Image: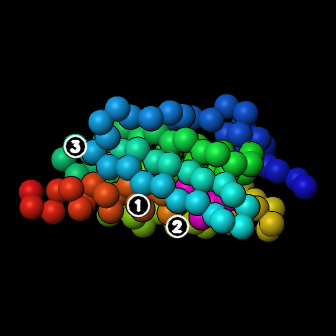
Amino acid sequence: MEYSEKVMDHFLNPRNVGEIPDPDGSGEFGNPVCGDMTHVYIKVEDGRITDIKFKTFGCGAAIATGSMITELAVGKTLDEALAITRDDVADALDGLPPVKLHCSNLAADALYAAIRDYQAKNKDS
């Protein structure tokens, strides 16, 4: 299976790994078929994601997509971050092998879940 240089870089040197203590929102998404799981934590100020971290239990592609989603989302408004698609994640990594495309779903869906968590906590604000 061939991975792009970007996938290998984000797998071997993942960005923004870890947890945010007391996050404004957090979300988790897993794939029962492969067993991979990604958790995303966000801090939000003035409607923008100012900090984002992730933790992934899974294959190299799942780790790479978790790393890439953090780079794509930081600094974005919540609406801009919600507009990041699974394809955007795969494209930013210069593609994923077809059998690994489901991994990009983990990162995007975990980000969406973190934003929904933030919105639910702040719906009265």
* Amino acid at pointer 3: Glu
Q: Position of residue 66 (x, y in %)?
A: 58, 48
Q: Position of residue 5 (x, y in %)?
A: 78, 43
* Amino acid at pointer 1: Ala
Boundaries of the magenta span:
103-107
Q: Position of residue 88 (x, y in %)?
A: 57, 62
Q: Can you identify the residue that label 2 sits on?
A: 85
Q: Residue at x 74, y 45 (%)?
A: 60
Q: Is residue 65 above or below residue 55?
A: below
Upstream in the sequence, badge 2 or badge 1? 2
One can see residue 72 in this view: no
Upstream in the sequence, badge 2 or badge 3? 3
50 in magenta: no
* Amino acid at pointer 2: Thr
Q: Can you identify the residue that label 3 sits on?
A: 45
Task: State the SS at label 3.
Answer: strand
- Which label is found at residue 122? none
Q: Can you identify the residue that label 1 sits on?
A: 113
Callouts 2 and 1 close, C-beta under 8 Å: no
Magenta segment's dominant SS is helix
Task: State the SS at label 1.
Answer: helix
The image quarter containing residue 114 is: bottom left
